[in-house]
Image (cartoon, rainbow, N blue to C red):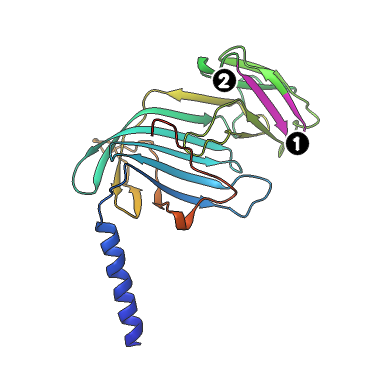
Amino acid sequence: MLLGLVLSCTQKQNETAQINKPINEPIAYYYDELNAFKLLERSDLNILKLINLDTLIYVSSSERRGRYDEYHGKLTRINDSLYHVRCYKHVEQRGNRTKPMAVAEDSLYFNCDSTLVNQELTIRYANYQSKRFKITSTYNAFRIDKKLYGKSGDKLFLSFGYRHPIVNELVILKYDYYANASFRTKTSASGFYVVIDNIRIKTLNSVSEGGEYISAPKFYLKRLTKKNGLSQGRHLYKPKND
């Protein structure tokens, strides 16, 4: 029993020393991965890229739940470990599980930014049949096969050349039956606070100055190291200017 207590104390001391160790690398990664055992769909991945303790990119993606959120922010240091994040870019998937304003049995409505106009959009059904369309406007209606997407429980998978900024994989959006699909980029989002150390990063409860709830990301991520790499063949994308 004494040996167990000694080992426990030693482990806590080692963890404390690791936490207090400064982040010397110009770029650090933190992540959380769920359902990595899935074979037919990607695992849920929450991953953050920290650049010079000055800038972060955080992406939360779940193919099975039909969710994609991407935040870019600048950090302002409050104390040794607490930082405020001012978001200057927010990319989000919206519309899942909600019916469009105008319902047509054989159409999918897709709203997007002007940056996606003239891009090719691929619609894939649950049976892996696919069809390609051209995005012609910020508000689009695409003809679909109602035999493959015409009742509750049916799903569609959309892709249009947009890539995950940290792992560089093609972003695939899943939408449930009668979803009003939307994928937009905003130039701002609610700010939030993070606590950063050498082994983890986490958000604090997000409230406005007036005490009202605000929408902001919430995460608790561990440091990504060579010992605990990403699953399913995922790799970090490192641009030439990094």
Q: CA distance from mark 1 to mark 2?
A: 23 Å
Magenta region, main secondary structure: strand
Three-letter code for the amino acid on which mark 2 is drawn: Asn
Q: Residues within 10 Å of mark 2 (few under 14, many from 20)?
A: many
Q: Position of residue 86 (x, y in %)?
A: 30, 32
Three-letter code for the amino acid on which mark 1 is drawn: Tyr
Work out which residue is located at the far bottom of the displayed protein and give it: 1
The tag earlier along the polypeptide, 1 or 2, is 2
Question: Is 104 left or right of 10, judged from the image as shown?
Answer: right
Quick check: is 120 in the magenta stretch?
yes
Residue 10 position (above or below residue 235): below
Specify the quadrant of the image occupied by residue 160.
top right
Q: Nearer the viewer, mark 1 or mark 2?
A: 1
Work out which residue is located at the far front of the displayed protein and give it: 240
Residue shown at 62% from the left, 12% from the top: 136
According to the picture, the residue beneath numbered tag 2 turns out to be 111
Question: Is 140 left or right of 223, judged from the image as shown?
Answer: right
Q: Residues within 10 Å of mark 1 (few under 14, many from 20)?
A: few
- Which quadrant is the C terminus positioned in? top left
Question: Is 202 left or right of 237, judged from the image as shown?
Answer: left
- Which quadrant is the N terminus positioned in? bottom left
Q: Which segment did they paint magenta?
A: 119-131
Residue shown at 46% from the left, 24% from the top: 185
According to the picture, the residue beneath numbered tag 1 turns out to be 128
Specify the quadrant of the image occupied by residue 128.
top right
Residue 212 position (above or below residue 133): below
